[in-house]
Image (tube, grey):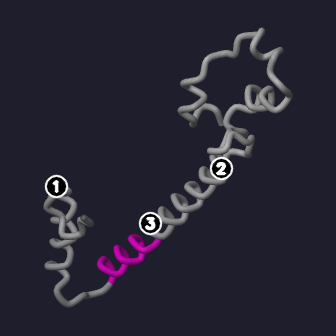
Amino acid sequence: MKLFTKRAQLTTPVDPAVYEAAPWWEKLIFDGGERLSRDGNGDVVFSAYPDRFVNSLIIAVTSTLLAVSLGTITAYGFSRFRVKGEADLLFFILSTRMLPRSWSPFRCS
């Protein structure tokens, strides 16, 4: 997990004298890495990083599966059946892929 956290990349090994002088909860922070952190009041709390990472994975997998399944069904429909205005619809889909993002009609500001 430390591979994904900037905090782990920026921290340096703790000086052994500082580690030995630290209370037990500070040693948990030194040993725990991203699992434990301090909140605004200085209290030791569990990090929200693992939960946020799992949420991001769920959203990424779900949206990918949804996009692939809808795209497959749409492509099958265009290839198998006659659709009124098929050439115009296919050209519109292709043209939105060719335009830069700043010119896309689906750009959200």
**Left or right of residue 39, residue 16 in this image:** right
Please name whichever residue, 33 or 56, is drawn nearer the observer in this view of the structure: 33
Give the position of the N terminus as an image quadrant.
top right
Location of mark 1 (residue): 100
Which labelled disc corresponds to residue 68? Answer: 3
Mark with earlier residue (3, 1): 3
Q: Which residue is drawn at the image coordinates 54% and 60% (left, top)?
A: 61
Residue 99 drawn at (x, y percent): 15, 58
Circle count: 3
Residue located at (73% from left, 45% from top) = 45
Q: Badge 2 local density, few (<14 within 10 Å), some, or many (20+)?
A: few
Q: Is residue 55 above or below residue 50?
A: below
Question: How far apart in space, not on screen, are marks 2 and 1 (Cα)?
Answer: 36 Å
For the residues bearing labels 3 and 1, Cβ distance under 8 angstroms: no
- Amino acid carrying mark 3 in the image: Val
Residue at 68% x, 45% y: name it: 47
Name the residue at 86% across, 28% down.
24
Tag 2 residue: 48
How far apart are the alpha carbons under marks 3 and 1? 22 Å
